[in-house]
Image: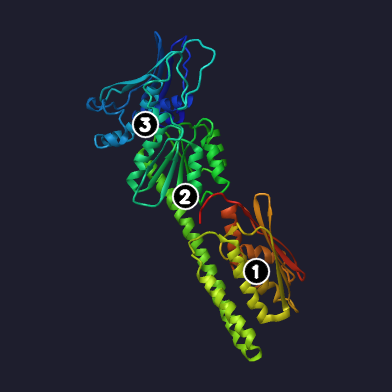
Amino acid sequence: MTPLAAAKNITLSLEIADGMPILYGDKYRLIQVFYNLVGNSIKFTEEAGFVTIFAYCDKETVCIGVKDTGIGIPEDMLEHIFQPFEQVEQGFSKNFDGLGLGLSISNDIITGHQGCITVESHIGNGSVFTVSLPASRNVEQLPRLDGNFFEIVDEGKMENWSQDNCVESKSLVIQGKLKTTIVVIDDYYGNVVSVASILKADGYTVKGYVDGVAGLDEIRLNPDVAAVILDLMMPGYSGIDICTEIRKDLTMLELPILMLTARTQMTSLVDSFKAGVNDFLFKPFEPEELRARVATLVELKNIEEKAIEHELGKLYAQINPHFISNAMIAVSECCYRDAEAASNMIMDLTDYIRFSFSYDHKIKEIELTKELELVRLYLEIEKMRFGDELTYRFEMEEEGKVKIPPFFLQTLVENAVRHGIRQKEGGGSLLIKGYREKAAYCLQIIDSGIGMSESDINLALLGQKSRGTGTGMAYVNKTLNSLYGTQLMIESQYGEGTQISMRIKERTVNRA
């Protein structure tokens, strides 16, 4: 909090009494409470003011508080400030936006620890928030409660804490006007409810979970999830752990992640960004800021989807008209030489067109078997056109359950035929291989065509036309990196042929 205070030239001080006893409780939740209280004091204290954190012991009660020289709170609002945000939003003036939400959560946490929060405040004279908690007694070991709280010594199981908030599988669903779904994962159910109550104003469908595993299952099975909101400080399965798991399948563009945290340590920020977090929001936060950040992340995902759809549309437009035109010319020529061959070519061409136009450009992945059928039809038509100058074969293993982006294989195969084999005198052969390797499916397109120089390869991957290679190879490489974190591997020797390899990582998330 020191940087926040320094930015407003506020003096931040401590007044801690000697001989303070130990407190037993959930340290993560207590940190959240005091970050909220101190953050509010700094927020509502004018430039060059004072914020003091104090602590003392009153018999068997530990009192920890925050005193400031801020703007104060009107007397008629004091009874409302610990209510949830949505219940008091009409009663708060613009100067107090965002105060009630954090205090409501803090009050629930302290109540769950069998304590209480009190406030004294006067307009223009600042505020004093005091947290009172029972002091610990000497015991060797404390059992852990289901709700991620530690049991207070000899005080039972926190009878004032709602049992609903202690159920690990607790979840909520707010059905919005939009299919766009936001998943919220926080081990404290009150936080889930509070965030959901803010986001529902924008029409999102919000699904909240206190169990990270249940939240991950929702992300994997629901293609409408547009963004994820994680709490950083969750015991056991932390926000960083969940983010790391998500990034095994989905990139930062495919599924943006917003991390909520009460901590400002640089190590936490660095570790989170390394795990693949898109953005941070520090507690306490303004509801409008949360809504704005979520809206930005949802728009980021929409832009990525539109870009992929646009690229696929360009690729589709590039492949079909040219090929179909050439195929029709070949059919007309073949009619004079071999009527039966012309008939077979027409049937194959009809199937090819039907397969091509049955693709939905909004679908990111299709079954590999369907793509292979399209490739087979393409190669059969080309073989009828060029005869013995083109030979091909497939060596596929376990391709039944594999999915790839549409036109991936078709693009690379057509490139091998048009710019490799047909450019070499006498033609050449083509081998299409598929096999599993660890957690990925590997595809190889190997031709004995004219080959590519190193500069040709570099230009092709950049999308700059080199000897007619077009933009298809660049699109495949870009999409490989976006969806799977891999790239095309190209080995070629001019005059001898080219081998193109790609790895399709197994994805446990349904994004079709």
Q: Is residue 169 visible?
A: yes
Q: Which residue is mark 3?
A: 102
- Mark 3 surroundings: few (<14), some (14-19) or many (≥20) residues within 10 A: many
- Based on the displayed image, in which of its 4 quarters is residue 346 positioned? bottom right
Residue 496 image position (x, y, % from top left): 77, 69
Position of 88 with respect to 469 (left or right) is left
Q: CA distance from mark 3 to mark 1?
A: 58 Å
- Give the answer, above or below, for where 503 lies relative to 329: above
Choose between 122 and 62: the one closer to the eye: 62
Q: Which residue is mark 1?
A: 413
Secondary structure state at the residue bearing disc 3: helix
For marks 2 and 3, the one nearer the N-term is 3
Residue 260 image position (x, y, % from top left): 45, 37
- Quadrant placement of the N terminus: top left
Choose between 20 and 198: the one closer to the eye: 198
Residue 426 image position (x, y, % from top left): 75, 79
- Based on the displayed image, in which of its 4 quarters is residue 427 positioned? bottom right
Q: Which residue is mark 2?
A: 222
Q: CA distance from mark 2 to mark 3?
A: 30 Å
Q: Nearer the viewer, mark 2 or mark 3?
A: 2
Secondary structure state at the residue bearing disc 2: loop
For marks 3 and 1, the one nearer the N-term is 3
